[in-house]
């Protein structure tokens, strides 16, 4: 394999493999009388194991109804890193506060704080996300059209801010 070498005097194969793969070769031994023996051999070089995952952004906040993209970065035993955002399993500690898609997109549901976790095998990391209440709740409709007896009345009330969905009711006279 690339990065490894055979010492012809000792038979020791050493070095640092530089490429993942399965490498077949034939080892040949020759003694002082020029007699040879051979043996087919194989070295399988595996990828460096995952040792940590980091979820970013850390300790974030989003408005109610908003979205936030999280990223999972894996660190391997050889110090290399890789984006694992679409490879990990994502989870929310409280789906009543925020949900998270398989691609790491969190969707705010209601005000509160929850953990967001990325897991691959036995390795995981988490962070927190706080869902902030939406902007101030307001009734935008300031006047209504006049009605006529025996005719259907079409008017809609408009709202902004707060945390949808809204529930309307009549209070007072």
Image (tube, rainbow, N blue to C red):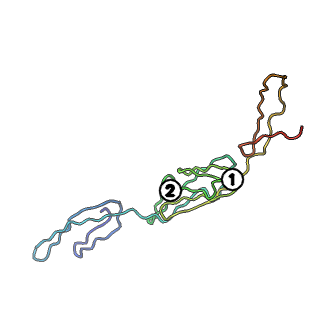
State the residue position of label 2. Answer: 88
| Res. 46 image quadrant | bottom left
Packing grade of label 2 (10 A; few <14, some 14-19, many >=20) is many
Q: Secondary structure at mark 1?
A: strand
Query: Residue beneath label 1, please?
Result: 131
- At x 72% / y 46%, what residue is drawn? 163
Crowdedness near tag 1: few (<14), some (14–19) or many (≥20) residues, C-alpha within 10 Å: many
Q: Could you say where residue 159 lies in the image, as x and y percent from the top left? A: 76, 38
Q: Nearer the viewer, residue 45 or 86?
A: 86
Depth check: give the residue in front, 35 or 133: 133
Residue that appears at 47% across and 57% down: 82
Q: Secondary structure at mark 2?
A: loop
The image quarter containing residue 4 is bottom left
Q: Position of residue 5 (x, y in %)?
A: 28, 67
Q: Is residue 99 left or right of residue 144?
A: left
User: Which disc is residue 165 wearing?
Assistant: none
């Amino acid at each position: 394999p690339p990065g490894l070498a055979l010492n012809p005097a000792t038979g020791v194969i050493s070095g640092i493999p530089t490429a993942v793969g399965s490498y077949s070769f034939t080892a040949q031994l020759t003694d002082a009388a020029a007699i040879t023996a051979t043996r087919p051999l194989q070295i399988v070089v595996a990828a460096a194991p995952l040792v940590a995952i980091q979820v970013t952004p850390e300790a974030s906040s989003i408005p109610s109804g908003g979205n936030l993209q999280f990223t999972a970065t894996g660190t391997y035993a050889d110090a290399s890193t890789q984006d694992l955002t679409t490879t990990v399993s994502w989870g929310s500690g409280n789906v009543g506060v925020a949900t998270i898609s398989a691609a790491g997109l969190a969707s705010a549901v209601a005000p509160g704080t929850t953990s967001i976790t990325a897991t691959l095998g036995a390795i995981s990391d988490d962070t927190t996300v706080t869902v902030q209440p939406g902007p101030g709740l307001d009734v935008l409709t300031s006047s209504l059209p006049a009605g006529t007896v025996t005719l259907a009345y079409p008017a809609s009330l408009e709202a902004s801010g707060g945390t949808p969905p809204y529930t309307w009711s009549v209070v007072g006279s």
